[in-house]
Image (cartoon, rainbow, N blue to C red):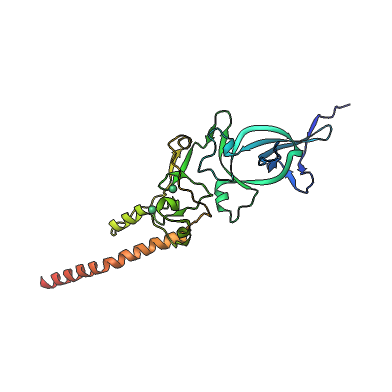
Amino acid sequence: MAKRPEKRNLPLHIITGTTNVVRVGDCVLMRPSENDKAPYVARVDKIEADKNKHTFVHVTWYYRPEESMGGRREFHGSKELFLSDHHDVQSAYTIEGKCTVHTFKNYTKLKCVGPDDYYSRFEYKVATGDFIPDRVAVYCKCEMPYNPDDLMVQCEHCKDWYHPGCVGLTTEQTKQLAEFVCSDCSASLKKSVNTPVPLSSGKVLTELACFFSCCAKAPEEVSGAVVKMDEDSFHHAHQDFVQCTALELMPVLFIYYLISVVSCFCQ
Ligand SMILES: [Zn+2]
Ligand SMILES: [Zn+2]
């Protein structure tokens, strides 16, 4: 007679005391051993039952910044997690709920962040403390990676993002702004009325390791929602600038026209 396998794969698991269904690939909150700790977050890779009908889940842990070697830094958001290379097998009984770990881009597009919404922008190698990717885009005069918990304002021209505190604005003033042009762009725009200023992405890639050493500069504390200028308002502002420049040039062009007509007439 064929021997029954010790373990068999299950297509799903129903969280104890709920009707919530967990499937492979879902992200879950797992009960910590100490009650005062935040739940652990994991991705479910496999669900299986043993011969005694106990359900186990094979998981990949998400690490919170404070659990990583470098610790939490000012650019880490409160909902930030790192997808680690730490795999484990746990009793399915420790699953207390489901959650969503978004990509960073999708997280920043969420209209409303719920308590079970998290994001991950880095993979984390537990043994070495390394991150993938190891370079990160930095913004503002303080050259910090983007923390979605902090209020930022985008320059209409260079498209870089700034912390209000780094450009001499308060949070309230920033929320009232219809548009914002940074001091560098305002100066360039004044200097070159006739020469269009090239647009840059306002984004510089910097070694992530740099932020885990003493060279990291802390931006001023700001909090609140993210202020985003949409592409349309940016293009309108740019068109206004072009139209304004053309109007300012009109008298000059008219004088040129008069001189050429008079000189033609004289010949
Ligand atoms: Zn800044
Ligand atoms: Zn600018």
Q: Quadrant of residue 260?
A: bottom left
Picture residue at 83% right of the left edge, 35% below the top: 53
Find residue 232 and report its horizontal and vertical position in percent: 46, 61
Looking at the image, residue 162 sits to the left or right of residue 4; the answer is left
Residue 88: x and y in percent read: 68, 32
Q: Residue furthest left?
A: 267
The one nearer the camera, 19 or 51, is 19
Quadrant showing the C terminus: bottom left
Q: Is residue 239 left or right of residue 52?
A: left
Residue shown at 40% from the left, 52% from the top: 167
| Residue 61, picture quadrant | top right
Q: Is residue 183 left or right of residue 14?
A: left
Give the image quarter of residue 204: top left
The x and y percentages for residue 188 are: 31, 54
Question: Does 29 appear above or below 226?
Answer: above
Q: Residue at x 27, y 68 (%)?
A: 250
Q: Locate residue 218 relative to residue 184 in the image: left or right.
A: right
Q: Given the current orientation, which residue lies at the most extreme right position?
A: 1
Q: Nearer the viewer, residue 81 or 235?
A: 81
The residue nearer to you, when weighing 133 against 266, is 133
Note whether 235 is above or below 150 in the view shown: below
Residue visible at 60% across and 35% down in the picture: 84
Give the image location of residue 118, x and y in percent. Answer: 61, 46
Q: Quadrant of the N terminus?
A: top right
Q: Which residue ends up furthest to the front in the rendered image?
A: 36
Front residue of this view, candidates 104 and 31? 31
